[in-house]
Structures are given as C-alpha cells and as structure tokens.
Image (tube, helix red, strand yellow):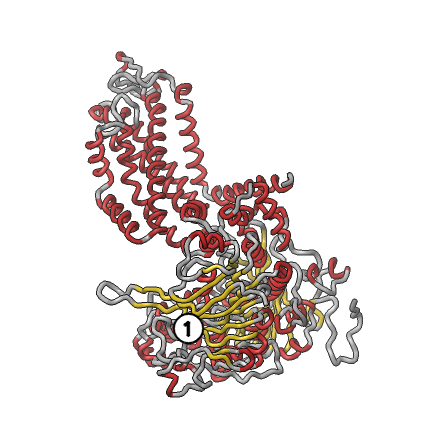
Amino acid sequence: MSLLDIRNLTVEFATAHGALRAVDGINLQLDEGEIVAIVGESGSGKSVAMLALMGLLPWTAKVTADCMLFDNQDLLLMSPKKRRKIIGKDISMIFQEPMTSLNPCFTVGYQIAEVLAQHFGGSHRSHQERTIELLQQVGIPAAETRLKAYPHQLSGGMCQRVMIAMMIACQPKLLIADEPTTALDVTIQAQILDLLVELQKANGMALVLITHDMAVVAETADNVLVQYAGQQVEQRPVKALFNNPRHPYTQALLDALPERSEGQLLNAIPGVVPGQLDRPQGCLFNPRCELVQEHCRQQPPSHQEGILCHYPLPLINDPAPASGETLS
Amino acid sequence: MNAITKLTSRSVRLQQWREFWFYYSASKTAVAGLVFLIAVVLMALFADVISPHLPSEQYREFAELPPAWMEGGQMRFFLGTDYAGRDMLSRIIHGSRLSLIAGCIVVVMSMSIGILLGLIAGYRGGWLETIIMRIMDTIMAVPGLLMALVLVAVLGPGLLNAMVAIAITYTPSFVRLTRASTITELNRDYVTASRVAGAGPVRLMFISILPNCMAPLIVQGTLSFSTAILDTAALGFLGMGARAPLPEWGTLIAENRDLMLSAPWTVTFPGIAILLAVLAINLMGDGLRDALDPKLKRS
Amino acid sequence: MKQPLIQARDLHKHYPIKAGFLKADQSLHALAGASFDLYPGQTLAIVGESGCGKSTLARILTLIEAPTIGQLTIDDIDAGTNINSATKKRLRQTVQMVFQDPFGSLNPRQTIGAILQEPLLINTDLNAAQRQQQVLQMMARVGLREEHYYRYPHMFSGGQRQRIAIARALVLNPKVVILDEPVSALDVSIQAQVLNLLMELQQELDLAYVFISHDLSVVQHIADQVLVMYLGKPVEHGPSNAVFAEPQHPYTQALLSATPHANTDQKQQRIKLTGELPSPLDPPTGCTFHPRCQHAMPACKTDTPDMKERHNEISTSCLMY
C-alpha cells in the first residue's frame, strides 16, 4: 500500500495577466521508507506541487487532482482543521533558508517544544527532555546549553539541524525537504544530507527531496521525478535515469553539467524556460530540444511509459524498441 | 540610434505608468481622493473665474446672511456671508489657493532639507550622523505646534513664516526615513558595483541610492501635505499664521469665532473644506503606499 | 615570459570591531596572507567556504578597500597599502567586477542603458552618442538585443541579468575581471550558457579572471590555478589539474570528497568533517584547521604552518609536510 498517491495534480494561480499554470499533471506514488527526488529548474513548479500537498499555497491558487491520498486519507476534501492535525505530525517540510525559517524572537528550545505541545498537548516544559533528545539526534553538540539559544546565534548549518529536529519531533511518515542544502557551504551540505538519509533509515520515513542539483540526486535518491515548466517529463529509478535518460530535457540537463563536458565549452541548452506569456504550442520543450520534429511543434505530447515525449530516447540494452518510435 | 529603440523608451515608460495605475486604481477610495484633489487644484487655479464675488468685497447690508437653503438666505450668496458681509463661497474658493500653496511649500522645504540631511547622515555615518540625528531628536521632542508657535513668535507672524516654522517641524521624519533607507541600500551589490565603476559620493547618494528610497518618502510627503494644511489652519486660527483679510481657511474660522453660535455657517464651511481636503489627500496617500509597496502587490 | 597582470604578496586585512564602551577593540583578521601571480588569459580560482576571506580579497583587488599589510601590483602599478585616488581612477579601467546576486547587483531604478553607460560616464570623455554606441556593441557581444536598452532589470531573467552584469564589467575594456560566484545563483542550463560566454570572452579579449566559487565542479572546468582558503588563510595553491588530481592539504581533500558527483556508480568514501566552521572573530590557535582535521597532531594546536612548495608546483600550509 503506497503511503502517498498523487495523480494528475494541477495548480493554477490567478494573476494580473490571466491564469498561470504552475503545475500541470504531476503523478507521484511513494512507499514507506522510499527516497524520491524531484528535480527541476526555476519555473518547473517543483516547490509549488509539494506546497499544494501541504495546503500552504495562497488563496489565489486553485488546486485540482484526480486523487491526492496520504495514508489512505483524502487530502483534497479534508477540512483545514483535520489537515492541521496531519501537517507537522505525519507530513513535515523543511525549507531552503534555515536562517529565516526559524522565528527570530523565540529560543530554539521553545520552538521545538511548541511543535510537540501542539500535537501531543502538555506544556513546553514537559517536553524538555524530548527536545534535548531531538537536538542530540540531529548532531548538535552540548544540547542542554543550546536550548536557550536564539536562531541568530547559530550558524546556517546549525539552524538547518534545528529545523530538522523540529520536523522529525513527531516522527512523521513523510518528510519533504525543499532545497535543504542550497544555502549552505559544501562541507555542511554533505553533513546535512548524510543526516537526512540516516534519520530516514532510522525512523522508516519516506523522504521527498526537492533540488536542482543533479549530483545530490545521484548520491541520495531511489527514484527521480524530472519536471520542466510545471510538467512531469520523466520518472525513473535513479540508476536508470543517470545511465540512460529517456527525455531529451533530462539528457540535456545531464550533459550541461561541467563534469560531463568534453572540451572547453560546456553543452549549454539554448533558450530559456518558458514563462507565463510565451508558452510554445505543442511540446513545451520544443524550442530548446535538439531532437525536435515538426510534430513536436504542433501537438502536445502524452505520457509514454512515464516519459512525456513524442519520441523518447530509446532504452539501452532493449533489443526491441517500441513501435512507432522514430529518431532523427 | 534608430527610431525603433527611441519608440521603445516611450513605450516602456507608458507600460510602467499603466502598471502603476492598475495597482493604484484597485483602491476605489484612493481614486476618489485623487479625483477630489484634482477638483480642488482646478478650483484653486481658476478661482478668479469660478468665484461669484471678490473675496475681499464687503456687502455691509448683507452681513451674516445665512446660506441659500436656509430661511433668509439668497442664491447670490450661496454659502452665506461673514461678519463683514463678504461672500463665504468666494472666500473659501480663494482660500484653497493659500492652503494648497502652504502645503506645497511646506512639503517641498521639509522634504528637500530632510532628504539631503538623511542621505548625508546615512552615507557618511560617524560623528556627522550623530550630530544630525541628535538635532533631529531635539526637534522631535518638542510638540510640533508649540515649536511652530515659538518660531513664529521669533520670526514674526505671517503666512510665509508659518510655513517655514511648520517645515522645520516636519524635517526630522524625512531625515529618519531617508537615513534608514540609505543604510539599507548602502550595502547592496548595485551600490558596490557603482563604487567599483568609480562613482563618487554625490553620484552614489543621488543617482544610485535616492531613487530606491523614494517610495516611503512619497507616501510620507503626501501625508505631510495634509498635516501641513491642518497646521497652517491651526496657526491661522491662533492668529499666528496668515493675517486677515487673507481668506486662508483657518483664519476664516478665527475671524468668525465670535459668531460660532449665532451664525454657525461662517465657521462650519471652512471647517468642512479643511476636512474634505485633508481626507482626500490621506486617501490618496494610502493608495500610493499600496501601489508603490512591492510586497503588497499580487503576483 | 609575459609580465603578471596582478602580483599579490602576503595580503592581510584587519577590521577593527568595537566591543563596547569599556572593552578594548577587537580585530577581525579577515585575510591572513594571500599571495599569487595572475597572467593575461589565465583564470585563478579562489575556493573556500563562508568566512574564508574570499570576499575581502575581492574588495581589495577591486580597490574598494586597501590591504592592511602586503604588496599588490596591478599592471605594474602599485595598488597596495598606500594607494591614492588618482591611481585608483587609473586602475579602475584595468580591474572590474561581476557580482554574485543577479537580482541585487543592478539598480532597480535605472534602465539597462543607464547602468551600462555609468562606467563610461564617470571614467571617459566620450559624448552621449559615442557612449550609446559602445554600450550597444557590448550588449550585442553578450547576447542582448537592442530593444533591451530601455528596459528595467526586473523585466529580465537571472541569466540575462548576469549577462548585463558581465557587459557592465567589460564596457571599460578591463584586463582583469573579478567574478564573485557569478553562476551560483543560476540554474544548471543557464549556468552553462553564462560560463561558455565567459570563456569565449576570455579568449577573444585575452582577459584574466579571478573566479571566486565554492562549486568545485565548475572550478575544475574553468580554472588554470586554484587557491584554496580557510578562515582567511591560504591552505593550498597550485595548477588546477594538479590540485584536483592530488590534493595535499586535508581541507582540500575534505572539500573534494564532500562535493557530490552526478554519477550513481561512484560511491564516495566521504571524509567526514566534524563540527562547524569556527567564527573568524575567535579562530583556533596554531593551525586554524586542526579542530576539524582528521590528521591533526599535538603540534597542530600550537604551531602555525606556512605555505611551502611541494611537488607538482603545489604549495600548501600543513605541518604534516
């Protein structure tokens, strides 16, 4: 039984220039203990999809889906009151900027105890022991003294650890991490990622890791979802994706990495991600695709074997390619 | 440079105005305020043409005449007359000129001095900043009207002196706003980039930093305009501002205050004029703040 | 042998920190002894994490601040501790900078044309038409269109803004460009475009780059020499391929092992660096890296190592050697 089942999630924002489709038909199934990475660049809608799941979008957003089940509960039809019981307890989320994610007016110990008090009742003091335990679990030295520290007294890495402590306090079944290490230094990034994987294994949590860094994905995830301009273009297990990307965008994204360049110049993808006002007809990636055909410019593609492309790149070591496939 | 790019400059500016108007007109009250203010400005500009009589012309036989809709009133003197038989409507129309000019001059003076001092204080820092801010603190510690009275007592009564006095009391708020914005903007990358390009202090202050501080200053300026009208009226009422027979709205109330019970229209209508003008400007200021503050903008 | 464009010897920078009314003033030693030579057409990468002094070094090289101690020669002109404003004006046309944040480095209230014209307005005697001509030429070179001249920064994407920033840096025809994390805030595909542009411009104009970054995969691709810094001190310096093939200093080794690779087959043996970066206000005694170093010896707590040249032209400051 899958823990999370999202089918055809779409999010539209009402703006001054008309409706903006930030997320367009995302599918995600997650089992307990699985790590899924959602990869995409700016404008891909990766954060918006997860915020929609958590119910954290502003009133201008319209969220629709064929199905949005968490642990067999329907998130679409749930009342806000019932949702608040789940958010923070069974589903948690950590964000990109650790320094601004914590309330600067309250101590670190108070904020962690607040989460516990909110979901389990009791006063802040009664949760002090558990708070110290959590701080130790996330690797903060001298946890007792840190209880009284304010966020501005801690470094970025420490703040992120405190955030993680807050979010695992209620032992959630699903943890969503939205670019948790982008704002941190390289060595701290490695520590935080290792911590997340360790906690995930110890508590049997499912982890959704949102990132734009392909290297982080390669080393951490089990399954990968690639998003482009709000659409889901590829969903594969991580090894298969890196060794044999099937969507031209995934292929181009991997080729653009400095470590995969041959020669002096990098393999840049020409053009930019389409915004609200210049969405192309047909396939959204067609203006930038190396393998574009006339058909791609007219007709939007549908999902073929999980790939949103008219002419997906072939499966390597597959002796019989699917019929109807042509490659220029 | 060809015609295409010249055209683009105009169209970019036009687009910016259109976008500004889109956000400004979202607030109906702000638009109402703007419309009323435009009406007052037009009234002041064409006062000689619109007003039925000369403001200083006395009709002794028609003194203390009630407004046209009350018993004993005449259409000729629509809002009634004052103690000397002068037409209230004409005096109020001409008075709008004085109030608007007073507001403008006060705001221009206090803003220009305030912004200059604030920029210098924020940019230079050190002892210069300390001196400027402590002087401003001292001015702010004294109640505004009281300080204006003292200054007028020193400089002598009269509309111009009243305006100078009020301007001095408004300067500290502009200094504070500008200094705070300057300190924030000073560490931004684009200021450093201008520095690397070799910009001197004058260019950095006025071309790089100042345009980015304007939003809160414009809002404060609009609100100061309305307060200036009120303060000018207050000083006029106390006899320390515009002297009679100038038809400044506060002075109008002052010279007719003995008639408050017997001929209430002589003080009520100038009062209403002040109220509506100040209200209109405040509503406009609110609308400006919403339009200029990027955080309140919808996506 | 060409003359080095920049010669830096033992640059130090101290910032006084006021500790309060009754306490003595503390001193923040932001930069503790950077030395390097930079030749035309070459790229020097400065690598390090927060507090390593790379921003301070950038400010010294762009003449915004003067070093407290040390010698700095730019294009044969002394730009060190005793620099005056006339020298600064002359050198401004030689050294320019591209900043990290594409959203903050352009004045939101100026049009692109005005932003790009500003360096010319301040430093040259060209008239308005000539300035406009040069700006349009530079815009075309970095891939911007003519109609962008009158637009405002918020109308552009991150990658385009970075192109504008590069155009601004190049409009005075400098010989050296300091690039402070120019692609860190950009998406991968745009990053590749901007890096390609930078490399093409370097070849075309024989520019020298000082490339500050924490992204080692980018550095490996673009740099000729690498200077690794930790808490203001240089810890390793050498040719880029040598340093990446055989890093000598434990910190460099840890940095390289902490950098993830887009490769599922390679399972990294991570060197775990324990602890947080110490505060620059209160650095550890002796070798500043010793609290986190896996090879720390008792001597490391008391003795401060100096940069010594080892094989492969790499210099490193470590007591192991």
Residue C143 located left or right of residue C298: right
Residue B152 located left or right of residue A37: left
On screen, B72 above or below A86?
Answer: above
Q: Residue at x 58, y 56 (%)?
A: C163
Q: Is disc 1 placed on a helix, strand or loop?
A: loop
Specify whether residue C120 is in view: yes
Mark 1: amino acid: Leu
Specify whether residue C50 is in view: no
Q: Residue furthest front?
A: C1
Closest to the observer, B37 or C104: C104
Q: Residue at x 79, y 69 (%)?
A: A326
Residue A246 screen position, x and y as percent: 70, 72
On the image, numbered disc 1 is attached to which residue? C231
Residue A192 located left or right of residue C190: left
In the rendered image, which quarter is residue A108 located in? bottom left
On screen, B162 above or below A95?
Answer: above
Residue C247 screen position, x and y as percent: 53, 80
Residue C7 screen position, x and y as percent: 49, 66
Closest to the observer, B130 or A51: B130
Dot 1 falls on which chain?
A: C
